[in-house]
Amino acid sequence: SRPGLSVWFSANDLSLAGGGKLLFNPNSRNVNLNPISKGKLFSTSFIFYPAGIQAQSASMLLIKNDKAIITSVNHISYGTFSGYDENAVKTENYTSSDTWLSFGYNEVSKILPLKYGVSNQLYISKLENITSTSIYSSFGLVWTNKKYKLDIGCIANDILLFHDRPTDNINSMYFNIGVCKDLIHLPLKLSIDCKLNTIMTPVDYYISGSFNISENILLNLGTSTRKFSQNTEQSLSQTIFGSSGFGVFFKNKELVIGYGLYFYGTGGFSSGLD
């Protein structure tokens, strides 16, 4: 598998702890099945991981006649490292990075209460002077019940279409099944997601929510069963808050600014700005 495919690129991802796959998130690599804006939208994100690792994203969304096109660039830099030859003699420094160029499309069915979409991605991975290129595709659909304000969807992620180094084992395909509902008595959109491997065995479960604190303030919370795999039993607080996210988003007419945090069960955190 390729760990780079699991990178999160937005504060929204961090604050929902990787959940909320059916929610709109323009800078995510996920298939965006529920665009919430009209016309054109530009979005950018900056993510700060531990050990000086940084990620940046920029995306453009165009919606017209219940059809949406989204293009994005996602980049993560793992840092600059000291180079040494086989005799442990210092050579030039080198860098390591991953870059994604994505093109996505989704549409609302005119016959059934369905939305469906696809995202095709060119993935360029670089380590020193070695470059690897792959093409991945993801697709999904979501069924909407407007009466109960309920969405149920399924997404097939990271289907490998091309790789220039066929000897590598880079099968990273997985499935996501999600349910998203607006609660009646609370200003909350609740999401429950399940990640499954290629033999349809559950890998992790996610629960997250977006609270409308006011007309202009949105609060995100999320956690997942990854807290058990990350649990080092060093402290009670790490056990409770591990693999959990928190974020605040401010809306002002056509501008949205958000800040998100993700806490690791092993200690430490990542932060991001949308």
Image (cartoon, rainbow, N blue to C red):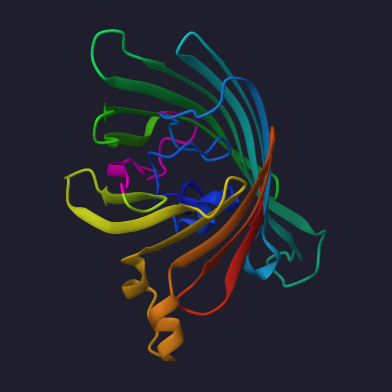
| Residue in front for this viewpoint, 126 or 86 | 126
Residue at point 59%, 52% (across, down): 11
Counting every numbered tag in the picture gives 0
- Residue drawn at x 24%, y 48% is 197
Residue 98, picture quadrant: top right
Q: From this viewpoint, which residue is outermost toward the front?
A: 185
Looking at the image, residue 52 sits to the left or right of residue 16; the answer is: right
The residue stretch that appears in magenta: 161-184
* Residue 2, x across and y down, in percent: 45, 49
* Picture coordinates of residue 194, whole percent (x, y): 26, 51
Q: Is residue 238 above or below residue 107?
A: below
Between residue 85 and residue 268, name the one nearer to us: 268
**Vertical placement of residue 101 versus 272, above or below:** above
Q: Position of residue 90 (x, y in %)?
A: 80, 68
Instruction: Using residue 77 as the reference point, say whether residue 143 is left or right of it.
Output: left
Q: Nearer the viewer, residue 187 or 166?
A: 187
